[in-house]
Image (cartoon, rainbow, N blue to C red):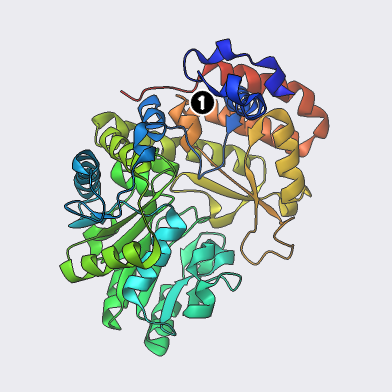
Amino acid sequence: MLALLYSTDNFGTMYDFIPKEDPEVFAAIAGEEQRQAEGLELIPSENYVSGAVKEAMASSLTNKYSEGYPGKRYYGGQEFTDQIERLAIERAKQLFNAGFANVQPLGGANANIAAYFALLEPGDTVLGMDLSHGGHLTHGHPVTYLAKLFRFVRYGMKDIETGEIDYDALAETARREKPKAVLAGFSAYPRQLDWQKIADIAHEVGAVAMADVAHIAGLIAGGAQRNPFDYGFDLMTTTTHKTLRGPRGGLILVRGDEDLAKKVDKAVFPGLQGGPHMHQIAAKAIAFGEALRPSFKTYAQQVVDNARAMADVFKEGGVRLIAGGTDNHLILADVFGSLGVTGAEAERRLDEVGITLNKNMIADDPRKPMDPSGIRFGTPALTSRGFKKEECAQVASLMFQVLKTPAAIGEARGAVRTLALAHPIPESYE
């Protein structure tokens, strides 16, 4: 067991109480600490927070109930929580050039749900990206309760080999279905969207232009991707982890419509959530402050450069990439069609050598979700550890060898551990 290799000495003073009070939980935490330190994280939605963010998450703010908003709380004792939430709001607005920000959503799904409730009535129509072409569960997949409340219609790629969105079909669907919201955003799409075209289509039919930028929020904040607000989008939702490198949580931004911002606030509280998690909001404030530093722009561009370097290795090896490559932080590869290895088997093999990614459906996938044709991987976490293009290409080569030749697993395991230990997980992002 990995956990057995770790002792409390490895953590300094970080864990003073858990080892004594709950050794079983500590053993699992220790195992996870070692897994992260000695392996390489390629799941595009995961990253490493700073020590400051972790300290905020473990602070005494977890003790405090703060229902309501700054200056309008339902409980007393809010002097410092109000200061923290106002800081988080102002920093979020500055990062994304937004007029209004709600920092209370507990996650990305919560943010999307609150946005829907602010914009829609039951039975209203939303036009969003098809899950099989890169969309997210909260964009109207039939398994979700959202699909029971609202009517979702979908758009997708015109050309899977290039990733080009069928904007003509999107416009035609919008004119025919008259959605109340046109939703742009994705969880497994490696190209950039034409924000201007989507905003124009939405406004032509009288719909709100909404962007779910959960995956690329950090790239937008760092200037490596375009900001939907610059092209007329009305509202954005995002997570605060992933490329933004903050705590797990959600955020809703409104470009400038004060009435819409008030609807969002009411949808979050009291409509959807009770007391916000103030320790999480403090951690968001810290992460937003980190993202406002000039060094974050360098980080964001390196994430994109590193992803392209990994994509090039797979293309050179003859692996089909959905959309033909990447413009952002993630790559979607058809390993079954290219190498005869299912997504689930690819995930298992790479886990065995210490490379973590996820199996993923590809566009028009003939296989089932739990054993699809593809894998999804990306570079936010590697880049946080200081990896550059050359090292990311080396990781991609190791992945390709393991997927092509199972006998390479033993040698690759040692190479992965060596790379990981040469790039320790940072505690500070100065």
Q: In this view, does 95 lie above or below 128?
A: above
- Measuring from the top left, give residue 199's x and y in whole percent: 29, 70
- Measuring from the top left, give residue 406's x and y in whole percent: 81, 34
Query: Residue at 59% of width from left, 29% of height from top?
Result: 40
User: Could you tell me if residue 92 is visible in this image?
Assistant: yes
How many callouts does the rendering have? 1
Q: Residue furthest top?
A: 9
Relative to residue 402, is residue 196 drawn left or right?
Answer: left
Amino acid under disc 1: Glu
Q: Is residue 151 above or below residue 231?
A: below
Q: Residue furthest front?
A: 76
Residue 278 sits in which quadrant? top left
Assign the C terminus to one quadrant of the image.
Answer: top left
Q: In this view, does 402 lie above or below 373?
A: above
Between 289 and 72, the one nearer to me in the picture: 72
Relative to residue 56, is residue 165 drawn left or right?
Answer: right
Q: Residue furthest right?
A: 407
What residue is disc 1 on?
A: 390
Task: Tell me the crowding category of disc 1: few under 14, some 14 to 19, or many 20 or more residues within 10 angstroms, Cα based.
Answer: few
Secondary structure of residue under mark 1: helix
Relative to residue 270, is residue 136 drawn left or right?
Answer: right
Query: Residue at 71% of width from left, 29% of height from top?
Result: 353
Between 428 and 166, the one nearer to me in the picture: 428
- Measuring from the top left, give residue 219's x and y in whole percent: 36, 44
Assign the N terminus to one quadrant of the image.
Answer: top right
Relative to residue 7, is residue 102 drawn left or right?
Answer: left
Residue 418 sits in which quadrant? top right
- Measuring from the top left, give residue 264's x and y in whole percent: 28, 66
Query: Residue at 34% of width from left, 42% of height from top?
Result: 64
User: Could you tell me if residue 257 is visible in this image?
Assistant: no
Q: In this view, does 343 lie above or below 415?
A: below
Q: Residue furthest bottom?
A: 176
